[in-house]
C-alpha cells in the first residue's frame, strides 16, 4: 500500500478520514463523488477557502483540497444586468465581462474627461451627478454646469462616446460602459482652440485621462499645433491624452506622428479596419495611429431612440476609435487605485531619474536616458520581490512583490528619451516602491527600484 500501510492500516486511516470529514464539514457537504472519492462542500461561515483547505491537508487524511469556483450569470462579478448589454458588440469583442471579473470598481481619484459636443445629463446612465458623473464645463461659454453652463446637447455624439466609456453599469437599464463605474466629466468644445482649453481645464480639475474626439488633419501646421499643446498639457498636469484618429481614410498621415497622446484608429465588428462602404468615411491609417479599437455602429445611450438615418450616422462617425484604448488605460489606472503618479526611479546605466517633493503631496520627477520613442510604464508595489512580467516584456524581473502591484503610469519616452512630470502622491503610496520599464526589447529595459519618500 502507499506510504507502507497494510490494507488493515489503510482501512483504519480511511475510516478516520471519513469520520473527520463528517465531524468537520457535516451539513456543509453538498456532494460526494464516489469514483473519485471526493467530497464537495460549501465553505463554512467564518472560514475561507484557504484556511479550511490548509486545515484539511494538515491532517494527512487528504491528497488535495482545492476551490471549486463556479462562474455564471448568477455570480455578481460575471456581467452586468443592463437592458441592452447584448447589443453591445464592442464589449463582446473586448471580452469586457471577463475583465470585470478581475476588477470593476472605479476610484474617486480617477476622472475621465470627455471633450465632445455635450451630454444628455437626464439619461438614466448619467443622471446621478457626484455618484460617477462629475460637474461638466462648457468651454465656449466659459461656465461650469453649476454656473448654468450648457452641458446638455441634442447632438447625441458626446452621449454615445461617454456611454461607451462609462455608462453606469449593473443598474438594470440602458447600456454599460466598459468602465461602468468610472468617474467622468463632459467638457463641451466646438473647435481645436476650445479642445486645448478643455484639456487645460480638465488638468486643472485633477482629471487623470483626457479623451478628445476633435478632428486632426495631416499637415505640418496641425501637427505642430497639437504637439506643442499636448506636450505642455501632459507635462504640466501629468495626464494621459487619448485622441481620435479621424474619420477620413483618404487623409495621408504617412509622415505625421503625435508623441504626446495616444491616437486611436477604428475597427468594425469583424476586427477589420473600418471603411464605410456607403460614403467617404472610415478609419485613417498611418504611423500616427498607436492602436486600433471598436469604432462603428456602437450601441450606446440614446442610440435606441434614433431614427434609421441617425443610426447610419453613428455608423459613419462611430466612437471615432477612442473606445477601447482610452478605457483600457483608464481601467489600468483604476486597478492602480491611482497614487496619481507619485514616484521616483533611476536607471542603473542609461536611465536616470530625479525627484523633488513630498508624500503625501505634490512630487515632480524627471527621466533621462531612456530609449527614445518607446512605450514605458511605471510600476508600483507595496513591497520588494521578484515578480516577473509576461509578454511583451516576457522574462523581465521587476524587483517588486505582488502586494499592491499595479501600473501607475503608461507613457511614451519621447524623441529624446527624457521628460518631466508632476503628480500628486496619496498617503497609501508613501513608502511604496516603483520601477520604470521601457518596452524596447525582450526582456525590457528597467530602472532601479526606488522607494517613495515617507
Image (spheres, helix red, strand yellow):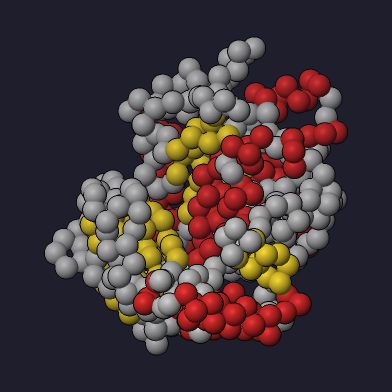
Figure check: 423 above or below 321: below
Q: Which residue is drawn at the image coordinates 36% and 44% (left, top)?
A: 259
Q: Quadrant of residue 277?
A: top right
Residue in front for this viewpoint, 155 or 451: 451
Q: What is the quadrant of the N terminus in the image?
A: bottom left
Q: Residue furthest left?
A: 349
Residue 301 appears anywhere in the view: no
Residue in front for this viewpoint, 313 or 421: 313
Where residue 416 sits: x, y (%)? 23, 51
Q: Residue furthest bottom?
A: 454
Residue 285 appears anywhere in the view: yes
Q: Quadrant of residue 112?
A: bottom right
Task: Please count the marks in the image.
Answer: 0
Figure check: 288 above or below 37: above
Where residue 219 sits: x, y (%)? 40, 28
Q: Residue furthest top?
A: 278
Q: Which residue is drawn at the image coordinates 51% and 44% (left, top)?
A: 325
Q: In the image, is 140 to the left or to the right of 99?
A: right
Q: Which residue is drawn at the image coordinates 54% and 71% (left, top)?
A: 65
Residue in front for this viewpoint, 356 or 270: 270
Q: Which residue is drawn at the image coordinates 32% and 62% (left, top)?
A: 388
Where residue 360 sits: x, y (%)? 47, 83
Q: In the image, is 207 to the left or to the right of 349?
A: right
Q: What is the quadrant of the C terminus in the image?
A: bottom left
Where residue 85 sits: x, y (%)? 75, 42
Residue in front for this viewpoint, 124 or 19: 19
Amino acid at each position: 500500500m502507499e506510504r507502507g500501510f497494510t490494507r488493515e492500516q489503510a482501512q483504519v486511516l480511511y475510516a478516520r478520514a471519513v469520520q473527520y470529514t463528517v465531524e468537520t464539514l457535516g451539513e456543509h457537504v453538498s456532494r460526494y463523488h464516489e469514483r473519485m472519492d471526493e467530497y464537495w462542500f460549501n465553505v463554512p461561515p467564518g472560514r475561507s477557502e484557504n484556511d479550511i483547505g490548509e486545515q484539511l491537508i494538515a491532517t494527512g487524511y487528504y491528497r488535495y483540497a482545492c476551490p471549486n469556483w463556479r462562474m455564471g450569470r448568477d455570480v455578481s462579478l460575471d456581467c452586468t444586468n443592463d437592458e441592452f448589454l447584448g447589443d453591445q458588440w464592442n464589449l463582446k469583442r473586448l471580452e469586457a465581462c471577463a475583465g470585470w471579473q478581475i476588477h470593476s470598481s472605479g476610484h474617486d481619484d480617477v476622472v475621465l474627461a470627455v471633450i465632445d459636443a455635450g451630454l444628455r445629463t437626464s439619461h438614466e446612465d448619467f443622471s446621478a451627478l457626484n455618484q460617477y458623473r462629475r460637474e461638466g464645463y462648457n468651454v465656449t461659454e466659459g461656465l461650469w454646469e453649476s454656473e448654468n453652463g450648457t452641458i446638455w446637447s441634442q447632438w447625441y455624439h458626446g452621449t454615445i462616446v461617454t456611454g461607451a466609456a462609462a455608462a453606469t453599469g449593473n443598474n438594470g437599464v440602458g447600456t454599460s460602459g466598459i468602465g461602468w463605474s468610472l468617474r467622468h466629466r463632459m467638457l463641451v468644445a466646438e473647435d481645436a482652440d476650445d479642445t486645448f482649453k478643455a484639456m487645460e481645464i480638465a488638468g486643472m480639475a485633477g482629471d487623470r485621462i483626457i479623451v478628445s474626439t476633435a478632428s486632426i488633419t495631416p499637415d505640418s501646421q496641425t501637427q505642430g499645433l497639437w504637439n506643442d499643446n499636448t506636450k505642455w498639457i501632459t507635462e504640466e498636469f501629468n495626464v494621459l491624452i487619448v485622441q481620435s484618429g479621424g474619420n477620413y481614410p483618404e487623409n495621408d498621415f504617412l509622415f505625421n506622428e503625435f508623441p504626446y497622446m495616444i491616437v486611436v484608429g477604428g475597427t468594425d465588428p469583424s476586427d477589420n479596419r473600418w471603411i464605410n462602404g456607403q460614403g467617404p468615411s472610415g478609419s485613417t491609417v498611418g504611423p500616427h495611429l498607436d492602436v486600433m479599437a471598436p469604432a462603428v455602429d456602437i450601441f450606446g445611450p440614446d442610440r435606441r431612440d434614433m431614427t434609421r438615418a441617425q443610426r447610419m450616422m453613428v455608423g459613419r462617425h462611430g466612437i471615432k476609435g477612442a473606445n477601447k484604448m482610452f478605457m483600457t488605460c483608464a481601467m489600468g489606472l483604476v486597478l492602480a487605485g491611482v497614487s496619481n503618479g507619485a514616484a521616483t526611479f533611476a536607471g542603473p546605466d542609461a536611465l536616470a531619474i530625479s525627484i523633488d517633493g513630498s508624500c503625501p503631496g505634490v512630487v515632480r520627477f524627471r527621466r533621462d536616458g531612456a530609449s527614445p520613442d518607446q512605450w514605458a510604464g511605471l510600476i508600483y508595489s507595496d513591497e520588494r520581490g521578484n515578480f516577473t512580467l509576461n509578454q511583451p516584456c516576457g522574462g523581465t524581473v521587476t524587483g517588486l512583490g505582488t502586494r499592491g502591484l499595479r501600473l501607475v503610469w503608461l507613457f511614451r519616452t519621447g524623441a529624446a528619451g527624457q521628460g518631466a512630470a508632476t503628480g500628486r502622491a496619496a498617503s497609501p503610496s508613501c513608502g511604496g516602491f516603483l520601477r520604470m520599464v521601457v518596452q524596447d526589447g525582450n526582456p525590457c529595459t528597467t530602472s532601479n527600484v526606488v522607494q517613495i519618500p515617507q
